[in-house]
Amino acid sequence: MGVKSITESIRSVGVWVGLPIHVWIVAEQDGVTLVDTGMSFMTKGILKAIEGMNAGPLKQILLTHGHSDHVGGLQNILRVHDVPVYMHAAEIPYAEGEIAYPGKDKAHVHVEKGILRPLPLVQGKSKELAVHGSLTPYWTPGHSPGHVVYFHQGENVLLAGDLFNGKRGKLIQPRFTPDPEMAMRSAFDIVRELDPERIEVCHGSTVYRPVGQLEDMEADIRRARELEAKLKARKDAKAKAR
Ligand SMILES: [Zn+2]
Ligand SMILES: [Zn+2]
């Protein structure tokens, strides 16, 4: 397990299991926030990294979404630190196994009922999520219905969960995404709006100035779509000729 300093107050804990999985530890004034919990075998490493940060006790857990590689370590961590756990309200019924995730036939309990609390909204607003310590959550649906990213404004870092995946310093579309169109719209909008200095994704490494990659990415996506349409047209024509 690797612990890496991202900025003064953010560290990442990562493993490689055929693809990288990262969680983030953020030092706050009164303790530590954990963003995502990885898989269950990462717990020991995460707890050690929290201790090693010397920034006080774990205060809260913020989740980007409910997929098992992001909430798998939750129960283990809660056994040691009984802290509040937050997730977007729209994601909770999927994570608790009440509704099947889009693209899945069956609902699965990823988190037992009674643990997850909805991320509070800004008072009087219907969508805007309230600031949580040094992090501001933003709703970015598409990869999952209630996917959220967390922006550290003070250090200009976007902790982005599965908003993108990363490959050799480049952002790519996230895998296992039932609504890629919506996911990319969410991703492009939030990166353009916040223009972070760096983006950290769960499955990938640091990307600096992500806004600079968006145009290339858009072109790649367009090309892939055009190719797909061409192949489909050729197949349809062949079927007709038969
Ligand atoms: Zn995911
Ligand atoms: Zn993931």
Image (cartoon, helix red, strand yellow):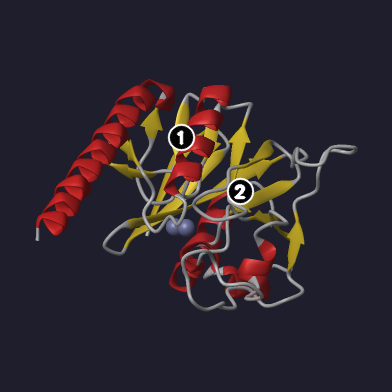
Quadrant location, ligand no. 2: bottom left
Identify the residue at horizontal 65%, vertical 73% (top origin). 96
Q: Which residue is mark 1?
A: 199
Residue 155 in view in this figure:
yes
- Report whether 225 appears left or right of 117: left
Label 2 beta carbon within 8 A of ligand 2: no
Say which of marks 2 and 1 sits in front: 1
Residue 30 x, y percent position in the rendering: 76, 45
Residue 3 x, y percent position in the rendering: 42, 50
Say the numbered circle drawn on residue 73. Answer: none
Q: How many marks?
A: 2
Q: Quadrant of residue 65?
A: bottom right
- Mark 2 vs 1, N-terminal side: 2
> Judging from the image, what secondary structure is the residue with disc 1 in?
strand
- Against 199, residue 216 (above or below) is above
- Report whether 237 appears left or right of 10: left
Q: Residues within 10 Å of mark 1 (few under 14, many from 20)?
A: many
- Against 27, residue 105 (above or below) is below
Q: Which residue is mark 2?
A: 54
Identify the residue at horizontal 28%, vertical 40% (top origin). 225
Instruction: Name the image quarter holding the N terminus.
Output: bottom left
The amino acid type found where label 2 is placed reads Asn
> Judging from the image, what secondary structure is the residue with disc 2 in?
loop
